[in-house]
Amino acid sequence: MELLFTSACCIKKKDYKLIGQTSIWMFPIYGMAAVIKPVSSKLKKHNRKIIERGLIYTVGIYATEFTTGTMLKKKDRCPWDYSKSKYNVKGVIRWDYAPLWFLVGLVYEKMLTKD
């Protein structure tokens, strides 16, 4: 997912090689998405609507991104830096990405559950 996103960002720069990038640090971070499966099961069990589930996933993704970003930044290992964004918090999260994280959470839910 990150490679697709960073490759697509190259279009804005008119770099049509579309070379995406990631970091080995991202593998365990994205691996944490597996927690969506048990969370999703509980949310569906309690008949939570898609909007509620998406919001819960968004909060979870932001919490993960903030925590891991802050920890990695202390060691100068954070592979992302949102400091130039108007809506950044400590350079590790961007509020304007909320719609993206909302959709990503629901996509992960769909990928990780059999329903």
Image: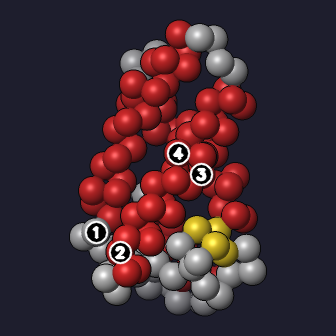
Quarter-wise, where is residue 49 in the image?
top right
- What's the distance in space between the residues labelled 4 and 3, CA to CA? 9 Å
Task: Identify the mark nearer the N-term, 2 or 1.
Answer: 1
* Nearer the camera: disc 1 or disc 4: 4
Where residue 72 is drawn, which disc sits there? 2
Of the 4 image quadrants, the one containing the N terminus is bottom left
Name the amino acid type tagged 3.
Answer: Trp
Give the structural element (helix, strand or loop) at label 4.
helix
- Which residue is pictured at 51% across the width and 82% down the height? 81
Q: Nearer the viewer, mark 2 or mark 1?
A: 2
Q: Is residue 75 visible?
A: yes
Q: Nearer the viewer, mark 3 or mark 2?
A: 2
Q: Residues within 10 Å of mark 4 (few under 14, many from 20)?
A: some
Q: Residues within 10 Å of mark 1 (few under 14, many from 20)?
A: few
User: Do labels 4 and 3 touch, CB within 8 Å?
Assistant: no
The residue tagged 3 is 101
Instruction: Specify few, some or many for label 2: CA neighbours under 10 Å numbering under 14, 14-19, or 20 or more.
Output: some
Residue type at the position of mark 1: Trp
Quickly name the residue at label 1. Answer: 25
Q: Which callout, 4 or 3, points at the residue further toward the start of the chain?
A: 4
Residue, disc 4: 60
44 relative to 61, above or below? above
Badge 1 or badge 3: first in the primary sequence: 1
Q: Marks 1/4: CA distance?
A: 18 Å
Residue 78 position within the rendered picture, expressed as x and y whole percent measured from the top left: 38, 78
Quarter occupied by residue 102: top right
Pointer 2 with pointer 1, Cβ within 8 A: yes
